[in-house]
């Protein structure tokens, strides 16, 4: 009986999804302590998972979205002689890549017409969609659970094939991230450039605003983020860092400008991370040390959860049940995260994604967000 099969985890495409896959990685590591476990992810995955080497032995970065991408990536994987693969993305490209790599055992969800490429197919939960019919859409299942179910299926397949000695218990479910020393140093340098270090080189108290998102419909209005920054500065005596990807530099600048125009005295208390050389690696360290993050439903929210950083999260036309995170509290009675939705009256039988107008994110009022900030910071 084999006890150390060589495993590939094809990581999800997005930052938040990759963080939500860390409990599945921890599950496999717990049951396969002697195995080599390799992650395959998009560019940036290694930086995101740096400092979490206990989860994966290696992270290979590659992009399979081009026509020849799957074949090229498979050529890199084939010499590794991997025994089994957990395919977390739902795409056809991810499954064909693993199949071309010659990996014998392939576990994933039967979506995107790729069932014939999998040796162990999982059926995603479906739901009734009013006016369309039964089983017309995917049910809103948290990605954390979605990936854990797939990881359990892989373990069961290994046990059935006598490649694994079964364990009796699973590890606790929690999002996990770490930081590398270079990432900590970059974050320290950014804080210095933002004048956010005291005389002992310790960070001054600050909050993070995360106004971006891959979908503009998920972005709370700029002027309301500026109002949140004003509240954090005046009521809670916090400095404010505005986070965004390089492509969101202008969005961050608009918020900083709005603060400067409306409250000139606060201009020196606000800084934009894209202007200071922020990266996903430095964001991890900055998030870990922040007092609070106010964010749309996007990747940095999950980074905050991994470091147990208090968070106020705003959901528009995306149902929060897709990304329900493990429960956590800053202290008894005070939640680590307050989730605000555009339409709290939407019945559980409905999904916010089906109601883009009813669930417009601008329906979340500024006073509601400020009250949530006060509740979390208490």
Image: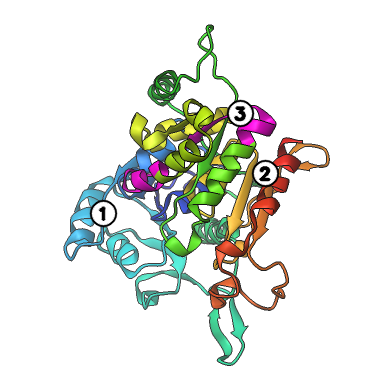
In magenta, the rendered stretch is: 232-253
Query: In front of the other: label 1 or label 3?
Result: 3
Are there few (<14), some (14-19), or many (20+) residues within 10 Å of tag 1? some
Is residue 344 among the parts visible in the rendering? Answer: yes
Question: Is residue 164 something that shows in the picture?
Answer: no
- x, y (%) of residue 237? 65, 27
Image vertical order of residue 145 relative to residue 201, above or below: below
Q: Tag 3: Cα neighbours inside 10 Å, few (<14), some, or many (≥20)?
A: many
Where in the figure is residue 277, as x and y percent of width and height?
Answer: 33, 31
Q: Quadrant of the C terminus?
A: top right
- The residue beneath circle 2 is 172
Q: Earlier in the sequence, mark 3 or mark 2?
A: 2
**Residue at x 48% of width, y 54% of height:** 17
Label 1 residue SS: loop
List the residue tagged with mark 1: 63
What's the image's color scheme? rainbow
Residue at the (43%, 47%) spot, across then down: 5
Rounded to the nearest angstrom, the CA distance separating label 3 from label 2 is 34 Å
Locate residue 84 relative to residue 55 in the image: left or right: left
Q: Residue at x 56, y 63 (%)?
A: 361
First reached walking from the N terminus: tag 1 or tag 3:
1
Task: Tell me, for residue 189, which label it has, or none.
Answer: none
Q: Which residue is mark 3?
A: 238
Sequence order check, earlier mark of 2 and 1: 1
Tell me whether the residue at label 3 lies in contact with that at label 2, contact meaning CB atoms closer than 8 angstroms.
no
Alpha-carbon span between mark 1 and mark 3: 40 Å
């Amino acid at each position: 009986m084999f006890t150390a099969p060589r495993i590939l985890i094809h990581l999800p495409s997005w930052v938040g999804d990759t963080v939500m896959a860390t409990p599945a990685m921890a599950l496999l590591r717990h049951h396969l302590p002697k195995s080599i476990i390799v992650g395959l992810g998009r560019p940036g995955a290694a930086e995101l998972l740096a400092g979490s080497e206990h989860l994966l032995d290696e992270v290979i970065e590659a992009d399979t979205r081009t026509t020849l991408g799957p074949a090229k990536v498979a050529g890199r994987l084939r010499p590794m002689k991997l025994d089994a693969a957990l395919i977390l993305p739902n795409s056809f490209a991810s499954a064909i890549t693993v199949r071309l790599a010659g990996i014998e055992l392939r576990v994933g969800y039967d979506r995107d017409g790729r069932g014939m490429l999998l040796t162990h197919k999982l059926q995603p939960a479906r739901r009734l969609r009013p006016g369309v019919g039964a089983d017309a859409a995917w049910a809103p299942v948290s990605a954390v659970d979605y990936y854990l179910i797939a990881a359990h299926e892989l373990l069961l397949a290994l046990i059935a094939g006598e490649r694994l000695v079964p364990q009796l218990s699973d590890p606790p479910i929690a999002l996990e991230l770490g930081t590398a020393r270079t990432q900590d140093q970059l974050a320290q340098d950014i804080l210095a450039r933002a004048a956010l270090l005291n005389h002992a080189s310790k960070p001054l108290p600050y909050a993070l605003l995360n106004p971006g998102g891959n979908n503009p419909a998920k972005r709370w209005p700029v002027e309301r983020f500026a109002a949140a920054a004003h509240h954090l500065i005046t009521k809670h005596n916090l400095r404010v860092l505005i986070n965004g990807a390089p492509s969101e530099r202008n969005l961050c600048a608009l918020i900083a400008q709005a603060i400067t125009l409306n409250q000139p005295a606060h201009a020196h208390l606000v800084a934009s991370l894209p202007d200071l050389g922020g990266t996903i690696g430095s964001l991890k360290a900055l998030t870990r040390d922040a007092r609070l993050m106010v964010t749309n439903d996007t990747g940095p929210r999950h980074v905050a959860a991994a470091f147990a950083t208090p968070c106020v999260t705003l959901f528009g036309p995306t149902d929060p049940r897709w990304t329900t995170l493990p429960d956590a509290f800053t202290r008894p009675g005070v939640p680590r995260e307050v989730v605000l939705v555009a339409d709290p009256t939407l019945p559980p039988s409905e999904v916010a994604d089906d109601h883009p107008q009813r669930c417009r994110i601008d329906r979340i009022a500024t006073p509601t967000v400020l009250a949530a900030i006060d509740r979390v910071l208490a």
